Image (spheres, rainbow, N blue to C red):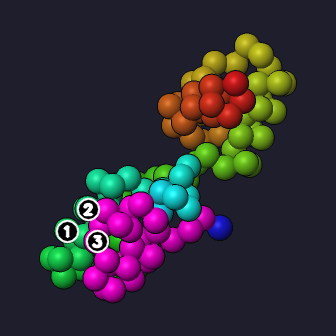
Amino acid sequence: AAPDFHSYFLIRIKLTKIVNEIYGDLLSTFSDSCPSLTTLKKWQHDFDRGSSALEKKARPGRHRETRTEENIATVKRLIDDNRQMTTRQVAAEVSLPRRTVSWLLTEDLG
């Protein structure tokens, strides 16, 4: 499971840590998946305005985690089965946004 950066951040802020210090700690430990300094500053702003909930707010729309091993494998299988499929056709087949399919094809499947 991915680290819960939001909860970690809120706990550190409650301990009166400085945002830049928290960012440095996260960056040194999770260099490839660390939230940006801008994100941490937004969280601090939310916290300063009274939001201390550790749970993330529900957002409308599609769940953002579409870059899964299962989706990558499904896209690969479809392309292997039919090299003539367009990105649009693959996206329709797997019910993912076309941009996500393009990302999977270029970044994960090369």
| Label 2 secondary element | helix
Quarter of the image where the C terminus is located: top right
In the image, 13 versus 108, the foreground residue is 13
User: How far apart are labels 2 and 3 at the CA level?
Assistant: 10 Å
Q: Please give the residue where the numbered disc 2 appears in the rendered image.
A: 41
Looking at the rendered structure, which numbered label has been put on residue 45?
1
Q: Residues within 10 Å of mark 1 (few under 14, many from 20)?
A: few
Q: Please give the residue where the numbered disc 3 appears in the rendered image.
A: 18
In the image, 1 versus 69, the foreground residue is 1
Determine the image quadrant of residue 10.
bottom left
Q: Is residue 96 left or right of residue 37?
A: right
Determine the image quadrant of residue 39.
bottom left
Q: Is residue 76 left or right of residue 7?
A: right
Residue type at mark 3?
A: Ile
Q: Is residue 25 left or right of residue 60?
A: right
* Magenta segment boundaries in residue numbering: 2-25
Query: What residue is at 50 percent from the left and 31 percent from the top?
Result: 99
First reached walking from the N terminus: tag 1 or tag 3: 3
Residue type at mark 2?
A: Lys
Rendering coords of residue 85 (x, y %): 70, 19
| Label 1 secondary element | helix
Question: Nearer the viewer's eye, disc 1 or disc 3?
Answer: 3
